[in-house]
Amino acid sequence: MRAPEAYEQAAGALPLRLKELALGLSREERGQAEELRLRVGQPVSVLFPWGERGLGGAPVDSGELEQLLEIASRASVHTVLDQVRRGYLTIPGGHRIGLCGEAVMEGGEIRTLRRLSSASVRVARQVKGASAPVLDGLCPGGRLEDTLILSPPGLGKTTLLRDLIRAVSGGEGCRPLRVSLADERGEVAALWNGAPQLEVGPRTDVVEGCPKDQGLMLLLRAMNPQVLAVDEITAPQDVSALEAAAGCGVTLLATAHGQGLEDLRRRPLYRGMLEKKLFARVVLIAREGTGRKYCVEELR
């Protein structure tokens, strides 16, 4: 799906008034828009790579956020309560709706959200070929090595991860391998009724909706992966799961937030991971004008 059409599909989840405002963008702007932002008491806005812009019109009200949830769930909110509890909702096309509001707690955990206060509709775009500039550096001898993708937020780590999974799973520019993906928040494959809404390759198995460490261990036991992939290492248990997988001879493919390797080395969670040499290669992503610059470095 082309970028403008992806935006239009994502905007289709909005209540009619807000949808009409969102579709007031030019085709070029629709192709560049990354998110639609809805905040109670503020006009709807659009996030572009260079910043956020309001679309005017009356402020969003709480009733419109409830309508958004009704439309996104196809009038079956009860069927998506588990996703709502985690603060997001995946819709057809792989677009993700992030939600904020009053958290209802039970047993020390969030049971659901009520009185919604804001929402973000993130436009999901498949960028086929995004991994082409780095494949040769990550696949010496034609086989993927343990790889960490590193960048600050918003520079396309998940996009690059998704395309690497697709390429490795399909044998595009490298040896084809079985890939198992722990997609906790549904941002990589975006399952909808069991089918990935974004292409992740013919040899890829996906578990979605559970904590990353549990998903990684489930995949390791159940799916006999050759590559184990995960987006955003954020907790000690994530690192422990990756260590266990590395000990089983599985190739690791993961992402992390960071300004660079020195930034990671200053943070205890990642310093230990680097010292144990879980990854052989790192892809560093930086902004270059309106585009991205990739740099592959060896870690072993």
Image (cartoon, grey):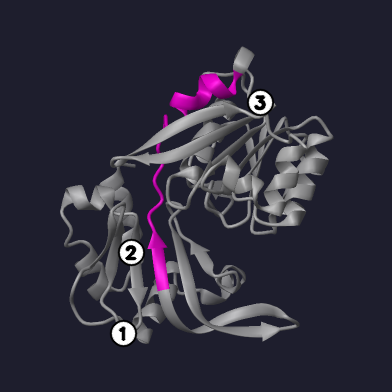
Query: Could you say which disc has been placed on residue 41 in the image?
Result: 1
Q: Secondary structure at mark 1?
A: loop
Q: Examine the image and state in which quarter residue 7 appears.
A: bottom left
Q: How many marks?
A: 3
Q: Residue 131, relative to residue 116: is it above or below?
A: above
Asked if residue 120 is among those painted magenta in the image, a careful observer would answer: yes
Q: Say whether disc 1 or disc 2 marks the residue closer to the N-terminus.
A: 2
Query: Could you say which disc has been placed on residue 36 in the image?
Result: 2
- Give the distance between the C-alpha atoms of the residues marked 3 and 1, in whole angstroms: 49 Å
Q: Secondary structure at mark 3?
A: loop
| Other residues around mark 3 within 10 Å, as few (<14) / some (14–19) / many (≥20) | many
Asked if residue 136 is among those painted magenta in the image, a careful observer would answer: yes
Q: Amino acid under label 2? A: Leu
Q: Say whether disc 3 or disc 2 marks the residue closer to the N-terminus.
A: 2
Find residue 60 and report its horizontal and vertical position in percent.
Answer: 30, 81
Q: Amino acid under label 3? A: Glu
- Give the distance between the C-alpha atoms of the residues marked 3 and 2, in whole angstroms: 37 Å
Foreground: disc 3 or disc 2: 3
Q: Amino acid under label 1? A: Gly
Is residue 73 visible to the viewer in this orientation of the structure? Answer: no
Is residue 249 visible to the viewer in this orientation of the structure? Answer: yes
Residue at 44 percent across and 55 percent down: it is: 92
Q: Examine the image and state in which quarter residue 283 appears.
A: top right
Judge by depth and name the residue closer to the eye, 58 or 244: 244
Screen quadrant of the C terminus: top right
Q: Residue 25, relative to residue 198: is it above or below?
A: below
Q: Which residues are magenta?
A: 119-139
Q: Secondary structure at mark 2?
A: strand
Residue at 45 percent across and 32 percent down: it is: 294
Q: Is 155 on the left or on the right of 58, as rendered?
A: right
Find residue 22 and report its horizontal and vertical position in percent.
Answer: 24, 64
Query: Could you say which disc has been placed on residue 145 in the image?
Result: 3
